[in-house]
Image (cartoon, rainbow, N blue to C red):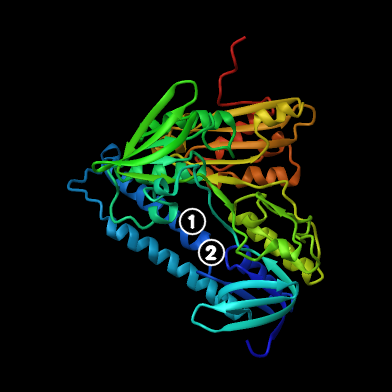
Amino acid sequence: MGVARVFDVVVIGGGPGGYVAAIRAAQRGAKVALVESRDIGGTCLNRGCIPTKALVRSAEVYQNILGGAEFGARVSGVELDFTQVMARKRQVVKKLTSGVEYLLKANGVQVYAGRAAVPRPGVVEVALRDGGAERLETKNIIIATGSGPALPPVSPKSLKLTISSDDALELERPPQSMVVIGGGVLGVEFACIYAAFGTKVDIIKRSPLILPPVDDEIAQRMAPLLRKINVTITTGIYVKEIKRRGDMLVLCAEKKDAGPVEFSGEKILVAMGRVPDFGGLGLEGLGVAHDARGIKVDARMRTSVPGIYAIGDVVGRFHLASVASAEGLCAADDITGHGRDMDYAVVPACVFSRPEAASVGLKEREAREQGIDITVGKFMYGANGKALALGEPDGMVKVIARKGDGKVIGVHILGAQATDLIHEPALALKMGATAEDVAMMIHAHPTLSEIVMEAFHGAAGQAIHQAPARK
């Protein structure tokens, strides 16, 4: 391998955790290398968050045009140019990944395109993608190898008939029908995307509720809204086998307490969430403590081996790009003498469905299970002037506050622009605000943010634009 190159920090993985950690460490004065086996930007920028949101936007525009008559804009001969949909998605991805590559270079981070191996702490060997190898010696290693797709318990033969989320981002045309295995964020988002393009979608899952990150009531209200856009949901399903029958694929399963059942579709998408990808680093040999859920770390992202840190999906605490970036900053700060503990008290979770959903803090069920005496405020989108003007009457905001002091402990939103509206409630949680604090702040009119305000009024016992409950 020749002469070893010496660094203060080597980051393994160039996703939103890894590249952020590399840049922060370099900004703090460290000499930094980043090793990435595939694409800078990782799953998020290349095969996850960004390309799916580009498709979400195309789906929104297409549906807005189709529904233009309601707003007085009659359009005839509307056609879906799916080739352009995919071309725009790739353009968005390329612009962002190129921007990250520029930032790494501008901050003096040395990037190695290849697969990393860690024979022992302090040494990273890189098998370069273009051939050859490099040996890097370093004081600190940050493992940011991300995650891979979770798979159903079926045979390899069955799996070969399915498509992954990566495949769903590269289809040549929308299928006429699709079965989605999994009703979490990934499954619901893809279901909404392809339903907007005309695909009949069946979501199947084991557990009784879709979208585990959001409040149970929000998930229950989401189900009928999905049915309105040609997405059906069947729960209590245990997948057994997938086979081809003519031009269709058939998913054979068992329904809890109901026996065998079949679902057929032109495509079957596996969207069951993510599991840690340890990158083939040989964690056992290194002595890095881990289990199937992820690498064990302390509050500053330090593993059981001095000088080795881990961040992002490989840790398994949250499978969110936003959390991976925050953990990357935490690890880099600790390495460069600016140590602080990670704070997971406020982590907004967003679903780019139709309509959107977003959540922060405790669910109502969680609060009650913890024995917290709570008050709940709700306000419906259909009672808001801006929502009606937009033609977006479906949804609600739900605020959960402690009854004694009024402190906000959870907020859940279903409806248009929920993923943006959630950050005012998130700040309220972060600052320890009460429901009345937020309710008494003047919100501009007419805006969707007034739905948030009205829900906080309700939690504070001061609902204005809502009739009191019947006694």
The picture places residue 432, in percent across and down from the top left corner, at 76, 42
Q: Residue at x 56, y 23 (%)?
A: 466
Residue 393, placed above or below residue 422: above
**Type of amino acid under label 2:** Gly
Residue 75, placed above or below residue 297: above
Q: Answer yes or no: do the residues labelled 1 and 2 have beta carbons within 8 Å?
A: yes
User: Looking at this view, is 73 or 333 the one in front?
Assistant: 333
Q: Residues within 10 Å of mark 2 (few under 14, many from 20)?
A: many
**In whole angstroms, how far apart are the C-alphas of marks 1 and 2?**
9 Å
Using the image, tell me which numbered label, if any, was put on residue 111. Answer: none
Residue under label 1, please give it: 48
Q: Is residue 416 left or right of residue 330?
A: left
Residue at the extreme bottom of the image, as rendered: 3
Q: Residues within 10 Å of mark 1 (few under 14, many from 20)?
A: some
The picture places residue 373, in percent across and down from the top left corner, at 76, 25
Asked which quadrant contains residue 86, the reply is bottom left
Residue 78, placed above or below residue 123: above
The reply to whether residue 390 is visible in this rendering is no
The reply to whether residue 81 is visible in this rendering is yes
- Callout 1: SS: loop
Task: Specify the quadrant that holds the C terminus.
Answer: top right
Using the image, tell me which numbered label, if any, was put on residue 42. Answer: 2
User: Looking at this view, is 269 or 326 the one in front?
Assistant: 269
**Type of amino acid under label 1:** Gly
User: Looking at this view, is 80 or 236 the one in front?
Assistant: 236
- Callout 2: SS: helix
Asked which quadrant contains residue 36, the reply is bottom right
